[in-house]
Image: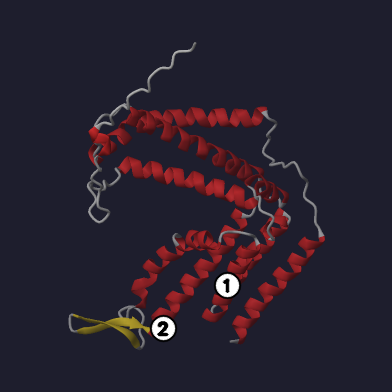
Amino acid sequence: MTATLPPAAPVPTARWLLEPQVGLCACAPSGRRRKGTYVTRTIDAAAGVVRAALFAEDAAAQPGLLQRLDARVKLVTLLGLLVAVSLVQQIPVLVVAYAATLVLAVLSKLPLGAFVRRVWLAIPLFTGIVVLPATLNLITKGHVVVPLGSWFGHRVGMTAPGLTGAARIVLRVATSVSVAVLLTTTTRWTRLLAALRALLVPRMFVLVLGVAYRYLFHLLGSVTDMYEARRARTVGAEDGRSGRAFVAASAGALFGKSHQLAEEVHQAMVARGYVGDARTLSAFRLRALDVAWIAVAVVAAGALVGLDRGL
């Protein structure tokens, strides 16, 4: 006969588990956002360089229009388009040329938003700030279209010729940078070096580019490791003064380490058969798409220059 055990008495739940927690109001955060130190911002910038390189490698592997072209053909034709853009003076023609770069980015399956940000957050924005004083009537004479008050009794403002010249320079720079970004983003680095060597670029120039590209990422990794090791051994908050002291103290060690690392990188490349000529697994070969692209590029360059002269 089996004995039946009496049911166990329920265990009372702790009172503190049943009490509601006091939540934090989203409109009134309890903490204060801290600004990153000098060293932290430097490391973040270095990581951004690595992310941009990885993005370029991923974009070059996409089955887009420019990715399918021969690297030599792409290099020569895009350089020809750069020359054509540098000869254009009319703003509407420059707008058409820039719109064409956006179309090429879409056909090459590049993220349009990232492409635009990568172009405009660099040289064109800086160029616009540099040429901004040239828009004033103090430098460029003409009809004032944007008055800015007076200075020592003289009327100050932006003139129509000044704004036209500034817009021309900014658009030309933006279009040129867009073409350069299209070339570097849609072409693997090894194939770009091989294309340069195939076009009779000096071997020493290609060698320096190849070593510098590989050495850059090794150096960024060394800098990141040094900072992470220091931060792992640091207790408490850091300030800008201690960060600058760390940079000054580690500069000599980093210089010696970088010199040794450069030797190791070069020896590793030589051990793998590198003699200054960049080689790829697949040989260059002209196809019908490459010939068609050459024809389109020549027609486009001639149309830009002819349309500019006709206006």
Q: Identify residue for label 1.
A: 99
Disc 2 crowd, CA 10 A, few/some/many (<14, 14-19, 20+)? some
When the figure is inspected, residue 225 is found, relative to residue 109, above or below; the finding is above
**Earlier sequence position, callout 1 versus callout 2:** 1
Q: Residue at x 23, y 47 (%)?
A: 32
Q: Position of residue 4 (x, y in %)?
A: 43, 17
Q: Identify residue for label 2.
A: 161
Compare residues 150 and 119 and report the one nearer the observer: 119
Q: Label 2, secondary structure: give it.
A: helix
Would residue 284 be found to the left or right of residue 107 on screen?
right
Compare residues 3 and 162 and report the one nearer the observer: 3
Q: Looking at this rendering, what residue extends furthest in the front direction? A: 1
Instruction: Tell me which amino acid carries mark 2.
Output: Pro
Q: Residue at x 50, y 46 (%)?
A: 51
Q: Nearer the viewer, mark 1 or mark 2?
A: 1
Q: Position of residue 93 (x, y in %)?
A: 57, 79
Q: Position of residue 275 (x, y in %)?
A: 68, 35
On-image quarter of the C terminus: bottom right
Instruction: Tell me which amino acid carries mark 1.
Output: Ala
